[in-house]
Image: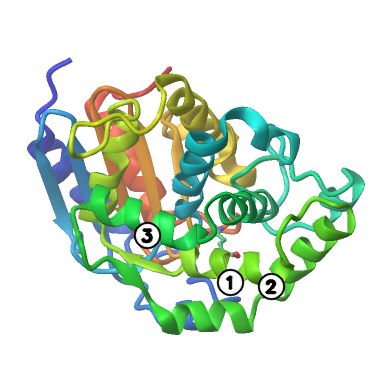
Amino acid sequence: MEVDYRRAVARVLEAVAPCVGAGKVADYIPELATVDPRQFGFAVATTDGQVHCAGDADTRFSMQSISKVFTLALVLYRDGETIWRRVGREPSGSPFNSLIQLELERGIPRNPYINPGAIVVTDQLLADGGDGFATLHRLLRTETGNPDLDVDDVVAASEAGAGHRNRALAHLMAGFGNMVNPVDDALEHYFRQCSVAITCRELAHAGLLLARHGIRADGTRLLARSDVRHLIALMMTCGTYDAAGEFAYRVGLPCKSGVGGGILAIVPDHCAVAAWGPGLDDHGNSVSATAALAAFADITGHSVF
Ligand code: GLN
């Protein structure tokens, strides 16, 4: 399928205009509440080397839960399948920071893309490598092509200060014997990974790792093809929390969202797409980025369905 991406990106920008500024910025992390909601960025990076951007594609935003895809990638690379003893692979149908399901299911999170699942993955990365965040940081710097990519320390401190639910989730898991490191250590790495400040252009570049089935920007293989298939299958079923069904219906592509308002979508063999708008819906997914990805799927015909 030959797609004119330049034209598609321009049409997405037109289609999304009525939604820009819609939704509510995340305020449970106080620093995120200070972001201007009337911004919108969009970037497509293709496996054949094209990059097309629109709007605020070079403005930094908080990566938040999108980082969970990359920590899982690193854990699969290092440990293979053993992580699945500690976390499941089913959609949760519950909010990403819910405690109820975790108690009922004896400290085993439903999947690696809700908060407790991602905390377990970060805990494993920390146990494996001694410095979980540094490993992620290196990977993101090389795959985004930005050697200066960094954490927004103000957001990290804000998140740590307001991180009561994440602490509760991590302690609950520790109570069930599903934490390896001291809870505070694992959480420090988790808060830092969520607070990476990234642009749509950079995120689309990093997403190519998945669109190319595990091949890094320098042409070497990081992940087995089957690991990437698993990572993006989970994006489809769990990447947008309790709205994954709606995403499959509207967008039809594996997506991972974050409460900073970003969403990464993967079209295997073709491209990685990053959309960002800070206003969120009730599930914690960006209203404008969701609309943009739905328009992108309609315009390009890219969909797994
Ligand atoms: N850092 C956020 C949190 O722990 C990540 C949640 C998200 O992006 N959905 O709550």
Coordinates of residue 303 in the picture (x, y in percent): 36, 23
Does residue 138 appear left or right of residue 79 in this picture?
left
Q: Residue at x 22, y 68 (%)?
A: 148
Q: In front here: 65 or 255?
A: 65
Q: Nearer the viewer, residue 172 or 39?
A: 172
SS class, disc 2: helix
Q: CA distance from mark 2 to mark 1?
A: 6 Å
Q: Which residue is mark 1?
A: 188
Q: Which mark is residue 184?
A: 2
Q: Which residue is at 52% across, 71% downward?
A: 26
Which of marks 2 and 3 precedes in the sequence?
3
Mark 2 and mark 1 residues within 8 Å of each other at the beta carbon: yes
Instruction: Name the quarter where the N terminus is drawn.
Output: top left
Quadrant for the C terminus in the image:
top left
Left or right, 51 with respect to 236, comes to left
- Specify whether tag 2 is near ligand 1 (CB below 8 Å): no
Helix, strand or loop at mark 3:
helix
User: Does residue 64 appear in the picture of this structure?
Assistant: no
Is the residue 219 above or below the residue 110 in the image?
A: above
Looking at numbered disc 1 in the image, what kind of residue is underneath it?
Answer: Glu
**Percent x, y of residue 36:** 34, 78
Q: What residue is pinned by disc 3?
A: 137
Alpha carbon distance from label 1 to label 3: 14 Å
Type of amino acid at the residue the image marks with label 3: His
Q: What's the colour scheme? A: rainbow
Q: Callout 2: few (<14), some (14-19), or many (20+) C-alpha neighbours within 10 Å? A: few
